[in-house]
Image (cartoon, grey):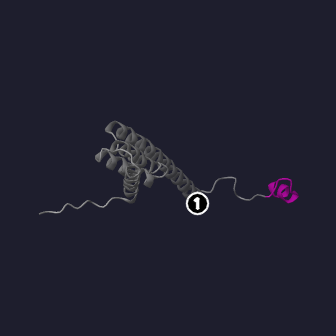
Amino acid sequence: MSTFLRPALSPAVENCWKAYKETYDLERGQGASDYEAYNRAKMAYRQAMPCLGEPHDIRDFIACVTYGMLLLLIPNEDGTKLLYAANVAAGSFRNETRQAKQAIKAKDANAARDAHHPQEGNESKEPESDPSAMRNAA
């Protein structure tokens, strides 16, 4: 006889699953029907999903959505929309990262150029109103 081992879940997915399970058990313990407990537990699962504020949160969000879809806690139509939202959020981070890298490259290029070719006009000159500068110029 073979034993089925459930793969380890990420902490975020574990948190969503825990919210689902605790809510379901609590609702059933308070006399809710299986249907009511299931619907409230599905909502608890969604509410436990991470926000899309940071790249690692986006990965966790995607993991929670996919696992929720796998368990039929999130309908495919909703899951598709949630995954699209995660994709949009990830795209905004890619753009920010790209812009930051371009700014660093430009800054490095300017620093290298300035180190090799000092800009004209940066040499220290004596003011022309100085009488000694006028004598030297004549």
Q: Nearer the viewer, residue 101 or 95?
A: 95
Q: Nearer the viewer, residue 12 or 45?
A: 45
Q: Nearer the viewer, residue 18 or 65?
A: 18
Q: Residue furthest front?
A: 31
Q: Amino acid at mark 1?
A: Ala
Residue found 69% across the figure and 56% down from its top: 122
Q: Along the horizontal axis of the image, is 131 left or right of 60?
A: right
Residue found 42% across the figure and 46% down from its top: 46
Q: Along the horizontal axis of the image, is 92 left or right of 76?
A: right
Task: Point out residue 72 in the picture as x, y percentages from the top left corner.
Answer: 30, 44
Task: Point out residue 1 in the picture as x, y percentages from the top left corner.
Answer: 11, 63
Residue span colored magenta: 126-138
Quadrant of residue 86 within the rendered picture: top left
Give yes or no for residue 128 being in the magenta stretch: yes
Q: Nearer the viewer, residue 14 or 21?
A: 21
Q: Considering the image in quadrants, where does the C terminus appear?
A: bottom right
Quadrant of residue 77 within the rendered picture: top left
Give yes or no for residue 64 being in the magenta stretch: no
Count neighbours of disc 1 (C-alpha within 10 A) and say few if under 14, some if 14 to 19, many if 20 or more: few
Residue found 62% across the figure and 57% down from its top: 118
Task: Point out residue 43 in the picture as x, y percentages from the top left corner.
Answer: 42, 45
Q: Residue furthest right?
A: 131
Q: Along the horizontal axis of the image, is 71 left or right of 4?
A: right
Q: Residue furthest left?
A: 1
Looking at the image, how many numbered discs can be counted on the residues? Answer: 1
Q: Along the horizontal axis of the image, is 76 left or right of 127?
A: left
Residue found 33% across the figure and 39% down from its top: 75
Q: Secondary structure at mark 1?
A: helix
| Residue for badge 1 | 115
Task: Point out residue 30 in the picture as x, y percentages from the top left corner.
Answer: 41, 50
